[in-house]
Image (cartoon, helix red, strand yellow):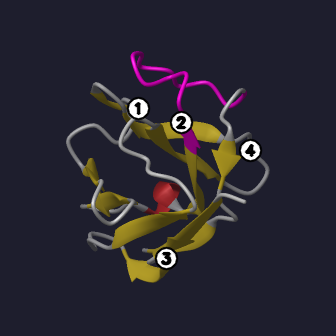
Amino acid sequence: QVQLVESGGGLVQAGGSPRLSCAASGRTFARYAMGWFRQAPGKEREFVAGISAFLYYADSVKGRFTISKDNDKNTVYLQMNSLKPEDTAVYYCAADTEFYSSRYTGNSGWEYWGQGTQVTVSS
């Protein structure tokens, strides 16, 4: 059973720079596309950042967030800088092999999802 476990969330002041981690167990994720998504209260889950054969970001976080991946540790990171209150959400990571050669940003089709970690940005 493959598991994705997110960590690093919490209460952060606006302008803060936390780093989220997503540790994957059970498989080698070198050839997996990994994505970060988020869901704010009352809103649909939305794409944030992805790493496959490419690095790609939602416009709302471009220049502030950085996604990276350590294949030796089976871990993907999301470095978040200059946080804003509107970044408050539950952040999820996702993994899939089929999206490795693409810049896929959709919610559906990802093979694995984590349980999510809450990030709350106070103003």
Question: What whole-number distance in Å separates the C-alpha atoms at marks 2 and 4?
Answer: 12 Å
Task: Name the residue rendered at 29%, 25% in the picture.
Answer: 53
Q: In this view, does 95 lie above or below 116?
A: above
| Residue at which label 2 appears | 47
| Callouts 4 and 1 close, C-beta under 8 Å | no
Q: Which mark is residue 80?
A: none
**Relative to the observer, which residue lies in front, 8 or 109?**
109
Instruction: Say what amino acid the circle numbered 2 marks.
Output: Phe
Q: In this view, does 122 lie above or below 2?
A: below
| Callouts 2 and 1 close, C-beta under 8 Å | yes
Q: Is mark 3 on a helix, strand or loop?
A: loop
Instruction: Say what amino acid the circle numbered 3 marks.
Output: Gly
Q: Where is residue 12 in the image (x, y as percent from the top left)?
A: 41, 80
Q: Magenta includes 100?
A: yes
Q: How many marks?
A: 4
Q: Which mark is residue 43?
A: 4
Q: Magenta includes 87?
A: no
| Residue at which label 1 appears | 58
Question: What whole-number distance in Å separates the C-alpha atoms at marks 4 and 1?
Answer: 16 Å
Which quadrant of the view contains residue 30?
A: top left
Q: Give the range drawn in magenta.
A: 95-108
